[in-house]
Amino acid sequence: MKLKTFAFIVLSLCTVFGAQGVTRVGLLAGANNIDLNQDGVPDLLVSATFDNNTSHPSQTLSAFINKNGNWFILPVPDDDGFTWSDFRLAGSSDKIIGFELHNIQGVYYLIRAMKFSSNQDNDDLTEAAQIKFSRYRVAESSEEPGAPVFYWQLSGSYTTSQTYSDVDQAFAQLKIDEFK
């Protein structure tokens, strides 16, 4: 009986403390078929490396939604492009912008991490700084002509209280329950 109780406690603790860590979706280089908008039809995420002969090539991601046999590209929020990209400072290995795909309770989210600078104190992004996480999910729009059919809808954000040199360090400690 004691062994069953012990096993139940260990399993419960693993579920509670491990739940956040298992939400990340690993993407392969190239094409990834994932149903981003949960309509039962696989969509397309293309993960690639952009190398412009710098010391730190960027990881990129472009997303396409398949609806009724038509393909729609998802523009990046707060940007004028269609490709998500991470960013490292020149001459530094510290990544100041990054992104990851997560599946949280059956919903796919793209989470962007950015070193947070108040710009009031002339913050140096080579120093450790707070990280702002923004979480996006695919939404459909039919509001106005000229607007994309699908877009990344902001569905929560939070800023870490701790400081990090690199956004990947912060992603390792991502707190899913902090998004508001």
Image (tube, helix red, strand yellow):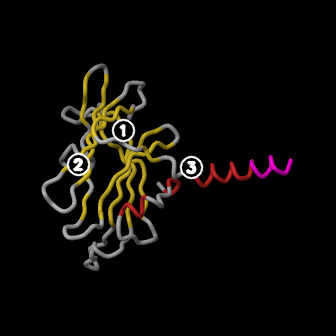
Q: Which residue is disc 2 drawn over? A: 49
Structural crowding at the residue carrying mark 2, measured as other residues with C-alpha within 10 Å and reported as few (<14), some (14–19) or many (≥20):
few
Quarter where residue 137 is shown: top left
Q: Along the polypeptide, which appears first: circle 1 or circle 2?
A: 2
- Mark 3 residue element: loop
Q: Residue at x 25, y 63 (%)?
A: 88
Q: Which residue is disc 1 drawn over? A: 138
Looking at this rendering, what residue extends furthest in the left direction?
Answer: 53
Q: Residue at x 45, y 71 (%)?
A: 162
| 55 and 34: which is toward the camera | 55
- The three-letter amino acid code for the residue at tag 2 is Thr
Q: Residue at x 53, y 54 (%)?
A: 177
- The three-letter amino acid code for the residue at tag 1 is Val
* Residue 171 placement (x, y as % from top left): 42, 58
Q: Along the polypeptide, which appears first: circle 1 or circle 3?
A: 3
- Numbered tag placed on residue 19 in the rendering: 3
Find the distance from the CA under tag 2 to the CA under tag 3: 29 Å
| 167 and 6: which is toward the camera | 6
Structural crowding at the residue carrying mark 3, measured as other residues with C-alpha within 10 Å and reported as few (<14), some (14–19) or many (≥20):
few
Quarter where residue 129 is shown: bottom left
* Residue 22 placement (x, y as % from top left): 51, 48
